[in-house]
Amino acid sequence: MNPRAFPLCIVLLSALVGGCADSVSVCTLIGGESGLLVHLSERLTVPFRVGVTLMLNSEMPTTMTVDCPDPTRCYQYVRFSVFTPESFTVRVTTAAGETSKEFRNIVYTKTQPNGPTCPGTFYSATVEMDVPR
């Protein structure tokens, strides 16, 4: 090979590879999970229950609950995984009583940690909830 042709080959090769870069998509394997996060107004020091109820129809409410019998092992955030309703009621129950609040038309944030052309699209929302006093 002619030594003067070597730089020309490098330039041509770079142009070919660079032209293909836009059409190549590399996906990562970052995981995630869709869901609803209930943020309690304060960290509780007594056992508690958080329930999310939605009305699928007028006769059949559906409720998902998370119980925390040992508050030293629970957090101020309560996660309802793979659960993304638009309208629902949240209830927080302790020995001191119960608080409830209705949420409507919740907008979930879309995340694609692996990129927009790769698998793995997740939806999440956080709602704020007062605790019983």
Image (cartoon, rainbow, N blue to C red):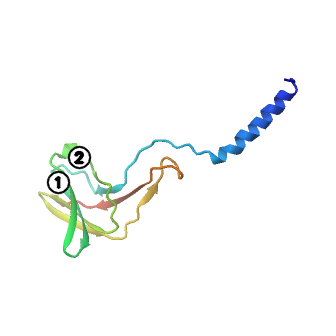
x and y, in percent, of residue 129 in the image:
28, 61
x and y, in percent, of residue 43 in the image:
25, 51
- In the picture provided, is 8 more to the left or to the right than 72? right
x and y, in percent, of residue 96 in the image:
13, 59
Mark before the other along the chain sequence, 2 or 1: 1
User: Given contact means CB atoms under 8 Å apart, are the residues at marks 2 and 1 in contact?
Assistant: yes
Residue at numbered disc 2: 74
- In what quadrant of the picture does the C terminus appear? bottom left
What is the spatial separation of the Cα atoms under label 2 and label 1, in whole angstroms? 10 Å
Residue drawn at point x = 45 percent, y = 43 percent: 30
Choose between 24 and 35: the one closer to the eye. 24
Residue drawn at point x = 83 percent, y = 33 percent: 8
Residue drawn at point x = 20 percent, y = 71 percent: 60
Q: Quadrant of residue 25?
A: top right
Choose between 114 and 80: the one closer to the eye. 114
How many residues crowd mark 1 within 10 Å: few (<14), some (14–19), many (20+)?
many
In the image, what residue type sits under mark 2? Answer: Cys
Q: Quadrant of residue 131?
A: bottom left
The total of numbered circles placed on residues is: 2
In the image, what residue type sits under mark 1? Answer: Phe
Residue drawn at point x = 86 percent, y = 28 percent: 5
Residue at numbered disc 1: 48
- In the picture provided, is 45 more to the left or to the right than 22? left
How many residues crowd mark 2 within 10 Å: few (<14), some (14–19), many (20+)?
some
Check disc 2 and report its element: helix, strand or loop. Answer: loop
x and y, in percent, of residue 91 in the image:
21, 63
Farthest-out residue, bottom: 58
Check disc 1 and report its element: helix, strand or loop. Answer: strand
